[in-house]
Amino acid sequence: MKTSELKSKIPEKIYDVLEKRGFLELRPSQVKSIEAGLFDDQNLLVCTPTASGKTLVAELAFLNAVLHDKGKAVYIVPLRALASEKFRQFKRDYPNLKISVSSGDLDSQDSHLAGADVIITTSEKFDSLLRHKAEWIRKLKTVVIDEIHLLNDSLRGPTLEIIITIIKKEMPKAQIIGLSATIGNPEELANWLDAKLVKDSWRPVKLKKGVYLNGEVTFKE
């Protein structure tokens, strides 16, 4: 769908950013997220294939938190390497925003984060920041959780579940955006998050299944 067709549903400052970045069309998952209440602080669980546009949904959410709601956003990823990658990406794409990354010392409050608009961190580090009761957390408007299916992971799952539980209890007005390409029970998870479920099967490249044998791949029709 052309971005211009959704102009009435997108805050002006955010629409200007999309226009400057050359987003003339939006993918199905992005359109569905907007129509589900992305810009109305609605919690969302976005379950769509890899490369279907989930990251832009998250970007629109944190842009809304910063430019429209005048608050802060946190982007939670499972790995420190991924936190560094997202930091570089967002710094490049949004030079006018104050982007920070925090994924190191779990005993530090990282007071410098008070001046950031968007904070990229791991679940373990954000758990630490919550427990240290960092002052800036009160300004949180949006929390993006990438790879939210890791709730089912034996190592990272418990920490992620605690984080979400604290957010729901202590910051009930904060918007939660969960992203995943692989969730077996999305309806149940969306219900627990008090979120609208955004599902779509569109992908930029058709997925084919095949069998590799003796140097050849036979694809299933």
Image (cartoon, rainbow, N blue to C red):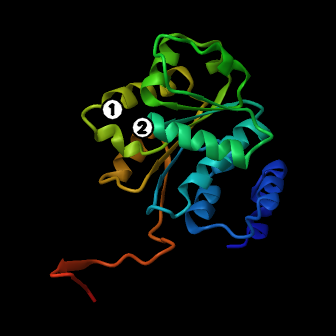
Name the kind of residue labelled 1 in the image: Arg
* Residue 1 placement (x, y as % from top left): 67, 73
In the rendered image, is residue 46 in sight? yes
Q: Identify the element where label 1 is drawn.
A: loop
Quadrant of the image containing the C terminus: bottom left
> In front: 157, or 208?
208
Q: Is residue 191 above or below residue 215?
A: above
Asked whether the beta carbons under mark 2 and mark 1 sit within 8 Å of each other, the answer is yes
Task: Please give the name of the residue rendered at 75% of the width and 69% of the height, measured from the top-left corner.
Answer: 24
Which residue lies under the disc numbered 1?
Answer: 156
Residue 41 quadrant: top right
Q: Is 206 displayed left or right of 176 in the figure?
A: left
Query: In this figure, which residue is indicated by the disc labeled 2?
Result: 78
| Percent position of residue 142, x then y | 62, 35
| Local SS, label 2 | loop
Q: Residue 122 at what x, y percent from top left?
A: 47, 31
Does 206 appear above or below 17? below
Crowd band around label 2 with a 10 angstrom C-alpha radius: few (<14), some (14–19), many (20+): some
Per the model, the C-alpha gap separating discs 2 and 1 is: 8 Å
Residue at screen point 76% across, 55% down: 10
Q: Residue 159, percent across and down?
A: 36, 26
- Taking depth in this image into account, of 138 and 51 the one nearest to the observer is 51
Q: For the residue marked with disc 2, what is the amino acid?
A: Pro
